[in-house]
Image (spheres, coloured by chain):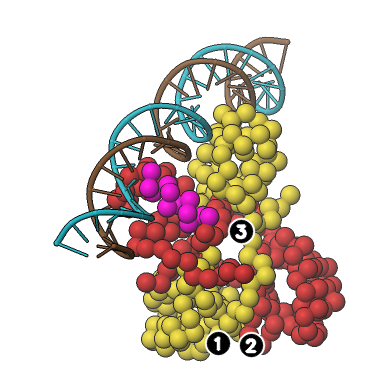
Chain colours: A yellow, B red, C cyan, D brown
Amino acid sequence: MDNYVKVKFDKIDRKILEILQANAKITNAQLSKDIGLSPAPTLERVKKLEQSGIIKSYHAKLDPEKIGLGVSTFVLVGLVGHNKSNIEAFMKEIDQIPEVIECHHITGTGDFILKIISKDITSYQKLMLEKVSEIKEVDSMQSMVILSTFKDSKVLPIPA
Amino acid sequence: MDNYVKVKFDKIDRKILEILQANAKITNAQLSKDIGLSPAPTLERVKKLEQSGIIKSYHAKLDPEKIGLGVSTFVLVGLVGHNKSNIEAFMKEIDQIPEVIECHHITGTGDFILKIISKDITSYQKLMLEKVSEIKEVDSMQSMVILSTFKDSKVLPIPA
DNA sequence: ATTTTGCACCGCATATAATTCGGTAAATTC
DNA sequence: GAATTTACCGAATTATATGCGGTGCAAAAT
């Protein structure tokens, strides 16, 4: 079990990671120029970063508004009990709701925070009433509607 | 100003968007097989989706733990005043902190919710004390530390 | 109903990019 | 300081993306 162990990577790897986080569509040729190596070892490094699990995957980022997703929210959820089986049952249900794009277990007031995205307020309300609040482990819910998003960076700050 | 208008796209486009959200590294040849078209019109469609702004960008997703980012949090922030200039000043400061990877203006208790990622609790505390709470527009802060993340989907549910 | 027009599609040719490989130099180990 | 490993480069090969001319279908017009 050596998951979640910090893996070694040097300054050049860090630069590669920064670039690929910001723009995954860059060609290997251009990437190699940007980091000051030839294409061959550049590709080798990228493959290693993928194999080691530092790079997990690549994703297209869409414009929510343009695909008809007008309402995004954060929801604080409290569970009726905090035991393991309860939490697992809750997670299993949440996993099946595609509108719930994030689910984190947190400290503080609630137990979980969800990020939910849906078409409009009506469909959001329907989702909450018919899906989320129907999960029997759910006790309390507190919604925060996102009025606007000022920053949504896909670039993590890699520590020195 | 016709930004943020829902753009037209058909069933095939929807499938393309679903696939590229889940896996941006797929080759055009494979994508064309998956959607049942030849490579040429497939590429045409992808380009159109990019040009129309439905697809905004492509990003590599990293494993935070493996690059030494052990602490993620949500922070509810209240401002001293809610006028436009205050909010803009706050945003400007936030924009310069790379550890703040998200910033949303919300309804409810606080005014903003931030997602912050850092190395460990010590560096998180330092960041909050020396950067975030130093922003003069910031009144209150309430942190929720993420204990674990159960779902972090990069695939938005595209409405029918 | 028939013609026209305009897309969206295909196959193929070409261009571009990724990938492999053999050799070399530098760094690390013993 | 010799041996061994690692990282790099350039060039050849392979795979992939891209551009183009032609075709058929569907919608619109007559």
Q: Position of residue A51 (x, y in %)?
A: 50, 43
Residue B44 lies in the magenta-colored region: yes
The residue positioned 37% from the left and 72% from the top of the image is B160
Taking the spot 77% from the left edge, 74% from the top edge, the residue there is B88
Q: Is residue A26 left or right of residue B113?
A: left
Depicted A42 relative to depicted C2: above or below: above
Whole-percent x, y for residue A111 in the image:
54, 80
Q: Position of residue A142 (x, y in %)?
A: 55, 87
Observer-nearest residue: A2 or D30? Answer: D30
Chain hosting mark 2: B
Name the one closer to the observer, C21 or C11. Answer: C11
Give me the C-alpha separation between circle 1 and circle 2. 9 Å
Instruction: Indicate the amino acid at tag 2.
Output: Gly
Q: Which residues are magenta?
A: B40-51
Residue located beneath label 2 in the image: B108
* Pointers 3 and 1 in contact (C-beta within 8 Å): no
In depth, the one of A50 and A107 nearer the eye is A50
Dot 1 and dot 2 residues touching (CB under 8 Å):
yes
The disc, 3 or 1, on the residue closer to the chain's N-terminal end is: 1
* Amino acid on which the number 1 mark rests in the picture: Gln
Please tell me in which quadrant of the rendered image residue A89 appears.
bottom left
Q: Residues within 10 Å of mark 1 (few under 14, many from 20)?
A: few
Q: Are marks 3 and 1 on the same chain?
A: yes
- Crowdedness of circle 3 by 10 Å Cα count: few (<14), some, many (20+)? some
Q: Which residue is rendered at x = 52% and y = 59% of the image?
A: B52
What amino acid does circle 3 point to? Answer: Lys
Q: Which residue is mark 1?
A: A142
Seen from the viewer's position, the closer of residues A6 and A83 is: A6
Dominant secondary structure of the residues highlighted in magenta in the image: helix
Residue A138 locus on image (x, y percent): 45, 85
The residue pinned by badge 3 equals A154
Chain for mark 3? A
